[in-house]
Amino acid sequence: MKLARQTGILLSIMAQRAYGVTPETEVRYLRGVGDKVAQVLAKLGIYTVGDLLFHLPRRYEDRTQFRKIAHARVGEPATFMGTVVMVDNLRPRPNITLTKAFLDDGSGMLELIWFNQPYMKDTLLKLRNKKIVVYGTVKEAGWGLQIETPEWEELGSEDDPNDLLGMNRIVPIYPLTEGIRQKRMRQIVYNALQYLNQMPDDLPPAIVQRVGLMSLPDALRQIHFPDSAEQIEPARRRLVFEEFFLMQVGVGLQRQKTQQERGIAMRIDPDHLMEQIHRIVPFELTNAQRRVIREIWDDMMRPHPMNRLLQGDVGSGKTIVAASAILAAVDNHYQSAIMAPTEILAEQHYINLHRLFLPLGISVELLVGRLTQRQRNEARERVASGRAMVVVGTHALIQEGVEFARLGLAVIDEQHRFGVLQRASLRDKGISPHLLVMTATPIPRTLTLTLYGELDVSIIDELPPGRKPVKTHWKTPEERIKTYEGVRKLIEQGRQAYIICPLIEESDKMQVRAAEEMAEHLQKDVFPDLKVGLLHGRMKPAEKEAVMEAFRAGEMHILVSTTVIEVGVDVPNAAVIVIEDADRFGLAQLHQLRGRVGRNEHQSYCILVANPKSEEGQRRLEVMTQTSNGFLIAEEDLRIRGPGEIYGTRQSGMPSFRVADLVKDMRLLEVARQEAFRLLEHDPELALPEHRRLREAVNRFQHRFVLATVS
Ligand code: ADP
Ligand code: MG
C-alpha cells in the first residue's frame, strides 16, 4: 500500500517535469541527468531520450522472489538476497589476491569470491548488516556453494523512494559502462518513460491490430519495468516488429524507385539464345538453371533496370547463368561488366567466359592489377570505344574510372561485400544497366531480406545431374598418414587433390612460410613420386594463374594451397580436399572450400583434419559432417556467430538493429515485410495523412542505416 502510494506520487512529479520532452530531446535535459552523467551515457551511445528508451535491459532479476540459498542449484544462474558476513582478503599465491565473503540469507551461506580486486574488501565491509542482492552462476566449492565475481547491488530501504525501482518487482539490469550504476540507470530510464503518454505511435493502428502488437508506450514500459515476466516477450516483439517494418518499408520504397527508373528494354529471342548456349556448353542445363535464365531474360526485356539476386549453392552452376545474361546483352550490342571480389576469382571468370565465348567470336577483356599501366590504358580504351563487349575485373578496377561506351549489364559476384548503398552508387554513374548480383555462398533468408531486400531473388535449387554429395570425414591429426593413403588411392584412380594449409592469422608472411614448408614436406617425404604444387596469396597473379592452369591441365596431382582457392575455383577432376586445422575456419569458408570438389560425377571427399579446442570449433565440424546443404550451413553459421561478426556491420551495409535479432526473429521479419509491402500497395508514396508519422519514422530509420553504412 505504502509502496503504491509512493510510486504514485513519484509518477505525478515526474510527469510534470517531462512536459515537452520528445525522443529527440537530449538526455542532459532529463531529470537526474547532469552534464557528467550525460558524458557517461554518451559512451554507451545514448545521446537522446529516444536512445535511452532503446537502451534495453540485457536481463532481468525477479526480486519479488529471491532464490533461497538452501535451494540453490549448481550450474544455474540465480539471484539471492542476504547480508554479507566474514569478509577477508587471502593470498593463495604471491600474485593473487582473493577476496572472500559469505552471503547469509537465513537459509544458508553462499561463498562470494573476487580475484585481484583487494579494494572489494573495504567495499564489502561497509555493507555489513545491509541487505544486498547477488546474481551469478552457482558453483560447487570445497565445502559448499560459491559464486565467482558475482554481480551485486545494495538493496535500498523502503524509506528511500529512489530505491523502489530495484525492489519487489522484476528489475531490469542494463548494459553499463564505467561511471554509472544500475540504480542510477534505472532511475534515468524510469524518468524518461514518464513522457510516453504524449508519444504517438508511428505504426498504423490497423497493422498494430492485425499483427496483434502492444502499443509503443506499453511496449517500452513493459520492456524496462515489466509488470510480470510474461510481459517481456510481447513487448520485445512489438519493438522488433517496428524495426523490421521500418526497414522493409524503406526497402519497398527503394524497390519502387528502381522499378520506375528507365532502363534498357532488350530484344531477346529465348529460343535462339538457348540454342547458342547449347552450342557452347558441353552439358544440358538443369531445370533450375533454365528457369532462372528465363527470369533474368524476362527482366532484361522490360524497360526498367533489372535488379536481381542470383543465389545458388556452390557448384550449382551460376557461371553459365551469368553467361546467358551476358549473351543476351551482347546480342543487343550492349557491353557487360563482371565484378569479382578478388583477382583470382576475376581471372577464373575470365578464363571461363573466354573459353565459353570463343566459339561465338565474343572477346572478353580482363582488367586486373597485374596489367602494366600501358596494358591497362589500352584495355580501358577498348572498353570506352565499345570494342570490348565483356569486361571482367575486380570491383575496384571497374569502379575506379572505367568508362563504358554502352554498358547494358553489370554482374556483381560478391561475397556480401557490397551493401545496398554501394549498389545504388553504381547506378548513380548516370547509367541504368541491368544488375545481376550473385552470392558466392547461400545466405539465410533473413539476411537476404535485410541485405538484398530491394532485389528480386532467383534461386538455383538443384545441382547438375550425377553429382554425388561430397563425403565429409573428420579425422584427428594422428590419422593423417591414413588420410594421405586415401588421397594417394584417389590419385591412382586419376583424380587430383587439394590440401589446405592451417590458417595462420599472425601474418601473411608466416602463412606463406607455413604453406611452403608444407608443400615441401609433402613433396619430399609423403608423395615423392607425385607432383605437388603450391598456391598462396602472396604469389604474383601471373604465377598464380600459371599454377592454376597447370593444375587444371592435370600437370600436378596435388595442390597445396591457402584459402585463396576458397571461392570460384573450378577444377572438376579434383576429387578430394584435405583441410588442415579445419576447426579454425568459419563454416561458410569450410563450405566454400568443400565446394571445390564434387564438381563432376566422381565420388568426392572432404577430409577435415582437426583436434578442436573450442566448443564452437567442434560444433562447426559436426555441422560440416552432417550436412552439405549450403542454406542450412549458412543458418547454423548465423546462429553460432551472429550477423555482425559474419558480415561486419559497416562494409556490408547491414543495418544495426537495436532490438531485433536476425536469428531469433526470422518469422517476424517475414510478417513485417508482408505488411510493409501491403501498405505500399495502397499508398506507394506514403502520401496519406495518416502515414505522415510513418514516413518520418522510415526516414529516421534510413538515416541511421546510412550512417552505419558510410561512416
Ligand atoms: P558455382 O559458380 O555455382 O559454384 P559453377 O558455375 O562454377 O558453379 O559450376 C560448377 C561446375 O559445374 C562447373 O564445372 C560447370 O561447368 C559445371 N556445370 C554447370 N552446370 C552444369 C550442368 N547443367 N550440367 C553439368 N555440369 C554443369
Ligand atoms: Mg562460381
Image (cartoon, rainbow, N blue to C red):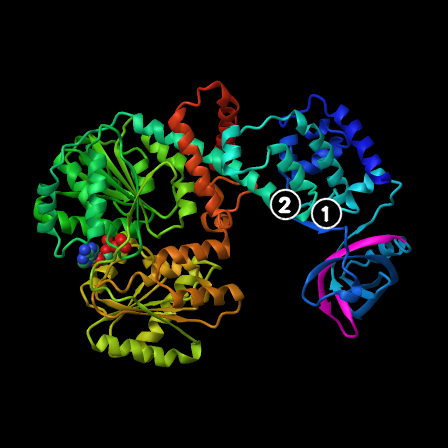
Drawn side of residue 405 relative to residue 103, left or right:
left
Using the image, determine if residue 260 lies above or below residue 79: above
Residue 328 in picture, x, y percent from top left = 16, 39
Circle 1 SS class: strand
Q: Position of residue 408 (x, y in %)?
A: 21, 33
Q: Quadrant of residue 509?
A: bottom left
Dot 2 amino acid type: Ile
The answer for how far apart the CA atoms under marks 2 and 1 are is 10 Å
- Position of residue 117 in the picture relative to residue 284 (left or right): right
Q: Position of residue 5 (x, y in %)?
A: 84, 35
- Up the image or down, 571 lies above or below 654; here it is below
Q: Nearer the viewer, residue 166 or 597?
A: 166
For the point 49% across and 59% down, the residue is 506
Q: Nearer the viewer, residue 100 or 71?
A: 71
Q: Let me know if residue 336 appears in the view.
A: yes
Q: Is residue 98 visible?
A: no
Please, what is the dominant secondary structure of the magenta stretch? Answer: strand
Q: Which residues are magenta?
A: 130-146
Q: Is residue 107 above or below residue 545?
A: below
Kind of residue at disc 1: Ile
Front in this rendered view, residue 32 or 349: 32
Residue depicted at x 82% and y 31%: 9
* Callout 2 touching callout 1 (CB < 8 Å): yes
Numbered label attached to residue 232: 2
Q: Residue at x 43, y 38 (%)?
A: 673
Give the mark nearest the N terminus, 2 or 1: 1
- The residue that disc 1 covers is 170
Residue 145: within the magenta?
yes
Quarter holding the N terminus is top right
Q: Residues within 10 Å of mark 2 (few under 14, many from 20)?
A: some
Q: Is residue 65 magenta?
A: no
Give percent across and percent down for residue 528: 27, 79
